[in-house]
Structures are given as structure tokens and as C-alpha cells.
Image: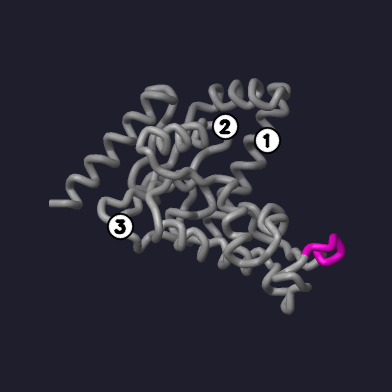
Amino acid sequence: MENKIVVTIGRQFGSGGREIGKKLAELLGIAYYDKELMAFAARESGLCKEFFEKADEKVSGNLSYAFSLGYSYMGAYAPYNDILSNDGLFKLQSDAIRNLADKQSCVLVGRCADYILRNDPACISVFIHNKLENRIQRIMQNEKVTEQEAKEKIASIDKSRASYYNYYTNKAWGVASSYDLSVDASVLGIDETVLFIKSFVMKRLELASR
């Protein structure tokens, strides 16, 4: 696809990364995938999306217990337990991400998409972080939790995302050198950060077309 745009977004929990990704996709007029990636991977693989939801951005564990829940693979029980391991599901999800990026311009949030698409010249990787106090307030407002609960969720989810990313990529989650662009959303605010990323993407496209 000529002038294809693929933007991957990693994000701290509560940083506004998801909102930034969605607004960026709208501004660029391209598709947006976050949780939708799991549904797409399920359709591509023939597995129920519950398998991918159970393993979403988690490293360890095996989903073979899902048989007891009545989930199926291509209309029958999965032939091998390793299909249901998190590593097996990561491979299936990776294949789905590559297929998506090959067919269309899109914004992809999380799930190591930057690493999976590292050999795609159209891919631009972005990481969004934010001040802790802003993240706490955002989570308290969006999820109706206390300040302490928000702090605990930040610590838990960021740890999980870092473990997942570091395990599958051999890179460091959230470290600027792991991405094309690392942005503190607290500096410009959500909407101006979206515009800033868009300008970066367009400049990258301009340079690539020379």
C-alpha cells in the first residue's frame, strides 16, 4: 500500500495512551485496534476470543483449563495444549497483527506490536508516559476508585505490561531507546500530544518518500 501508515503505541497505565491512539487514528483517517486485536486474532486463528483475553499482555500460565469452560478450536477441542499456552497465543496474535499491518494503515495499541512489526518500514513506534499524579487522577475519574486503589492498579498493571514486553522482545518497556518516539503527555496535554505525534508521522512519511 502506497504511503501506508502503521503507528504502534505502548503506554503506561493511566497515561492517556489509549485515548491518544484513538484520536490519532481518527485524525489520520485510519483504523484503530486495541482490544479489537484479540477479536481479530480469534477470527484469524479459529480460536474463541476468550483465550486471548485470558492471556492479554500476560507472560506466564497456560489456558488448557479453558477446555472445562467449553471453549473450542475450529469447532472442536484444540488438538495440542501448546496452542493454548501464552506463548502459543502470542504467536497467533503476532500473525494477526502482521496480517493487519500488511493490509491497511492503522494504529495498534500495546501487545508488543512495535516489536512484531520491527521489520515493517511503514511502522512508527511510540510510547506514551505521563506524570504519576495525572495518571492517578485519570484512573480515579475513569474507574471510580480511591487514590490508593489507583496507585495499586498503576503498579500492578505497569509491572505486568513491562514483564510481558521485556519477555517477548528482549527490549526494555518504556525506555526511550526502544521506540521511535517517546512522549510525556503531561507536557502538551492529550489533544496537543495527538497533533505532535501526527506531525512526527507526517514528517517521517515525507522523508521516507524522498
Task: Decide which of tag 2 and tag 1 comes sooner along the chain.
Answer: 2
* Residue shown at 59% from the left, 46% from the top: 35
Q: Is mark 1 on a helix, strand or loop?
A: helix
Q: How far apart are marks 3 and 1 (CA)?
A: 40 Å
Would residue 187 be visible to someone looking at this image?
no
Q: In this view, does 192 lie to the left or right of 39?
A: left
Residue closest to the eye, 139 or 178? 139
Residue 80 in the image: state x and y as whole percent.
72, 78
Q: Is residue 176 magenta?
A: no
Task: Decide which of tag 3 and tag 1 comes sooner along the chain.
Answer: 3
Task: Decide which of tag 2 and tag 3 comes sooner along the chain.
Answer: 3
- Binning the other alpha carbons within 10 Å of mark 3 as few (below 14), some (14 to 19) or many (20 upward) gives few
Name above or below for residue 84 compared with residue 144.
Answer: below
Residue 133 in the image: state x and y as whole percent.
56, 22
Q: Which mark is residue 153?
A: 1
Q: Residue 14 carries which label?
A: 2
Name above or below for residue 107 compared with residue 83.
Answer: above
Mark 2 or mark 3, whichever is nearer to me: 3
User: CB under 8 Å between callouts 2 and 3?
Assistant: no
* Residue shown at 69% from the left, 22% from the top: 147
* Residue shown at 17% from the left, 51% from the top: 209
Q: Is mark 3 on a helix, strand or loop?
A: loop
Amino acid marked by disc 2:
Gly
Q: Is residue 68 magenta?
A: yes
Q: In this view, does 162 lie to the left or right of 199?
A: right
- On the image, numbered disc 3 is attached to which residue? 1
Q: What stretch is highlighted in magenta?
A: 66-71
Q: Residue 141 carries which label?
A: none
Q: Distance between the residues labelled 2 and 3?
A: 34 Å
